[in-house]
Image (tube, rainbow, N blue to C red):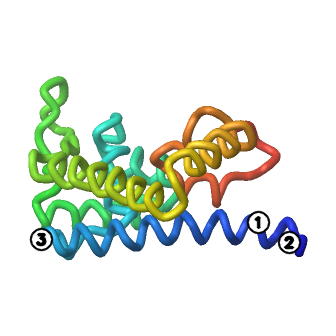
Amino acid sequence: MSRSGADLALLLLGGFRSLVDEATAELARRGHQDVRPVHDFAMRAIAAGADDATRLGRRLSVSKQAAAKTVAVLRERGYVTREADPLDGRRKRLQVTDLGFEVLRQGEEVFDELRERWARRIGSAELERMETHLTTLAGASPVRFDTPAWMARDLGEPS
């Protein structure tokens, strides 16, 4: 039976969603019940230089207000802090805390475990072939950690 292009897109999205949902559940079992995918995106963006709500909003393609709400949650949970900028004492910079980096590290570990689980289900060689095909079709560079941005971008603008 031949599938449609839309079916392919939904299967790929379903695979992504399955991995993310399983990773979120595993992080909860490891004591991080409060971590959501957007928190991972935000902490990675902050670690890469989005050190205030405006920059974070741009990186995630959300409003400054939405970014500020995410920052408030991350600060409340101890994943990020706001510290004085050493070059401008009036400015506060966002920083990922040791706990935030630990959650990111554990998340990466969980995804490696999930990949191994998939390899056991379909075979390592088959998983590697699938990854090779996806690399050929989607490109060698994985989607950036600010994945929400691709949904909001104007297709007429270069990314």
Mark 3 vs mark 1: which is more N-terminal? 1
- Disc 3 packing (10 Å; few <14; some 14–19; many ≥20): few
Mark 2 vs mark 1: which is more N-terminal? 2
Q: Who's the residue at 36% across and 41% down the image?
A: 50
Callouts 2 and 1 close, C-beta under 8 Å: yes
Asked if residue 110 lies left or right of residue 30, the reply is: right
- Front residue of 147/136: it is 136
Asked if residue 48 lies left or right of residue 62, the reply is: left
Q: Who's the residue at 19% across and 55% down the image?
A: 103
Q: Position of residue 58 (x, y in %)?
A: 49, 48
Callouts 3 and 2 close, C-beta under 8 Å: no
Residue topped by disc 1: 8
Residue topped by disc 3: 31
Q: Position of residue 126 (x, y in %)?
A: 60, 50
Residue 3: which disc? 2
Quadrant containing the C terminus is top right
- Front residue of 120/39: it is 120
Quadrant containing the N terminus is bottom right
Amino acid under disc 1: Leu
Specify the quadrant of the image occupied by residue 73: bottom left
Q: Who's the residue at 13% across and 66% down the image?
A: 77
| Vertical comparison of 150 with 85: above or below | below
Residue 114: which disc? none
- Front residue of 102/79: it is 102
- Front residue of 24/156: it is 24
Mark 3 vs mark 2: which is more N-terminal? 2
